[in-house]
Image (spheres, helix red, strand yellow):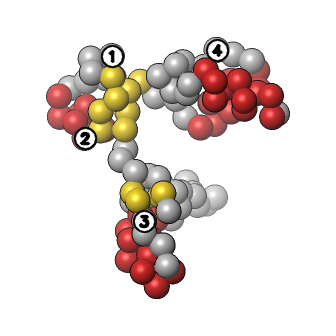
Amino acid sequence: FIIGRDMAGCKSSIDGEDFYGAYDAQDFAIEHGPELGVQAVPSLNLVYTEEEGYVTAEDAKEKGYESLKLSGTKFRSMLRAGDDIPEWFAFKSVVDVLRQAA
């Protein structure tokens, strides 16, 4: 069972603060996986850098690299608008399938 970073992410409509931490869903799944009959596979927080390509966010920060970012909201907007999606964010074949399904 793959659990990404911030899988439980949701914000308060009052103050905009996160209800859960970025890794709370991963921690929960690891803790409760055996009783649910699943083995959690936490995903790393990977970012894309021009210097080294894909690295963990922690490594990028430590090395002073600039991370290229594209939010899920921006990605969906670009998909709907037919804008070019950077290949460091999504494979062209995946983008094509997503656009066909829309």
Q: Which is in the foreground here, disc 3 or disc 2?
A: 3
- Residue 34's place in the image compared with 51, above or below, is below
Q: Disc number at residue 58?
A: 2
Tell which circle, 3 or 4, labels the residue nearer the N-terminal end: 3
Marks 1/3: CA distance?
A: 31 Å
Tell which circle, 2 or 1, labels the residue nearer the N-terminal end: 1
Tell which circle, 4 or 2, labels the residue nearer the N-terminal end: 2
Residue identified by numbered label 4: 84
Quarter of the image where one finds residue 47? top left
Kind of residue at disc 1: Glu
* Label 3 residue SS: loop
Q: In the displayed structure, does residue 11 sit left or right of residue 45?
A: right
Residue identified by numbered label 1: 50
- Residue 26's place in the image compared with 44, above or below, is below
| Picture residue at 54% right of the left edge, 18% below the top | 86
Residue lying furthest left in this view? 63
